[in-house]
Amino acid sequence: MPYTYKRGKSGMIFTISGLLIFSVVLWGLIAPEMMEQAMESTMTQMIQHFGWFYILSTAFFLGFCFYLGFGPYRHMKLGKKVDTPEYNYFTWLGMLFAAGMGVGLVFWGVGEPMSHYVEPPPGVESESQEAAEQGLLYGVFHWGFHPWAIYAIVALGLAFAKFRKDLPGLISSTFYPILGDRIRGPIGKTIDIIAIVATTVGIATSFGLSTMQVGIGFSHVFGWDNGTMMQLMIISVVTIIFLISVVSGLNKGMRLLSIGNLSLAGVLLLVGLLLGPTVFILEHFSKTFGQYATGFMQMTFQTTPYSEGEWVQDWTLFYWAWVISWSPFVGTFIARISRGRTLQEFIIGVLFVPTLVTILWFVTFGGSGLYYEMFENIDLAQAVLDEPEAGFFLVLSQLPFGGLLGFAGLLLIIIFFITSANSATYVLGVFSSSGSMNPRSYVLIIWGLLISAISAVLLLSGGIEGLQATATITSFPFMIIMLFMTVAIFRSLRKEGKEKHQIPEKEDW
């Protein structure tokens, strides 16, 4: 029987959240250098002192996902017994990538392996074969199981609360099994405020960084100047397009964009595999897959107690903190599109399929970049290290029909940009509509315009890096929230299992 919940007013939550967000943005506008120094210093201290906690927490999230996907509750549905998936599998996967990792894979698919090739992990010789292997391996590790497990925890908590218990689509709702009606009180409001601030700051930062990446794409493909005017034009055009898409609804605009984007990404991946160093790519796919499987546990729990460990702090720990700060946004969107799927189907789709695609993507494009650097004597590594967002276009330019492929790559990034902004605006609309999964159009438009305005202001003032550090700082309190969220999920599952007097078989759920 569903939990009962009396919806309360959320004006206080959004007033406080709005003031906090406005204060941070105002700081970034008035004193961007001061903000950047203060936030980056705080972020560095946080990662240095609590890096071990990030490592253990992320490992726990992943283990908990494996337990849910393959344990006794694997046939539990994210919804009622009669619910069926709203989207087919291909569309669902496309929407997952659109919200979660699309822009990141394009940005870092070449950028990270080439960066590690020049500046490898400790103990590895720079620009060596081992550096190339480690570059691809760590790229896959940072974009594989672990970040998707973090997103999955938030998505599962929200999906159970909304679709099985008919609670509002708010982060605080996931704590009903622990707090009961107290989620309407100060604790619940604090949870929602943290989630809203983390989401808004993270989205605004990503919007600004994505604008810079699209600008680089126009510069490489068309030779246009990647200046301030170009970036403002990109923000304006993208804002118009994604607002039209988000108002059209997930079943129209977002669905069509996601299908098109996943198809275009698949075509580029196939072309990169066939026109690039195919044998090298296939051999490295096998090698990287094996290294990832055998070194998985060691990399998962890697810390550096006998050294300062700057490389681990700058890459792995920063990634985990950044992904956690993004999880309210991505997790909420994944929950919205996953109704009716079983836990096992959800875990396989959210963890295993994206990880397999990640390995293939990194090895195809990152591996091609390393091949051209090491065997064709084409100087790409240093250029990519200096400007990682250009790596994807530099690799495409080495292939036959490089100009056409560069244009297709730019189109891919733009659509990923639009779909990410679309899903982000939708999530903020949910949070500002008392958790309704179908927020009103005017709410979505307001949020879309606000995020675009914040990004434009910060690009002009140079405050993007400070805001990025701020988003990472918010990850620490939200990581604590996520740990308690796993307790709430388990309690809910165990309660339903006890009510049925035994662990049910598949047909009973």
Image (cartoon, grey):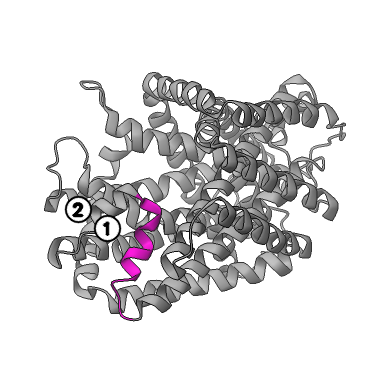
Q: Residue at x 61, y 37 (%)?
A: 201
Q: Is residue 509 visible?
A: no
Q: Residue at x 56, y 50 (%)?
A: 228
In the rendered view, does 12 fall on the left or right side of 147? right
Q: Which residue is identified by label 2?
A: 133
Q: Amino acid at mark 2?
A: Glu
Q: Which residue is identified by label 1?
A: 289
Q: Residue at x 57, y 68 (%)?
A: 89
Quadrant assignment for the C terminus: bottom right
Dot 2 alpha-carbon crowd within 10 angstroms: few under 14, some 14 to 19, many 20 or more: many
Dot 1 alpha-carbon crowd within 10 angstroms: few under 14, some 14 to 19, many 20 or more: some
Q: Position of residue 277 (x, y in %)?
A: 22, 73
* SS state under label 1: helix
Q: Is residue 254 visible?
A: yes
Asked if the magenta segment contains residue 7, the reply would be no
* SS state under label 2: helix
Q: Which residues are magenta?
A: 387-400
Q: Amino acid at mark 1?
A: Phe
Q: Is residue 238 above or below residue 401?
A: above
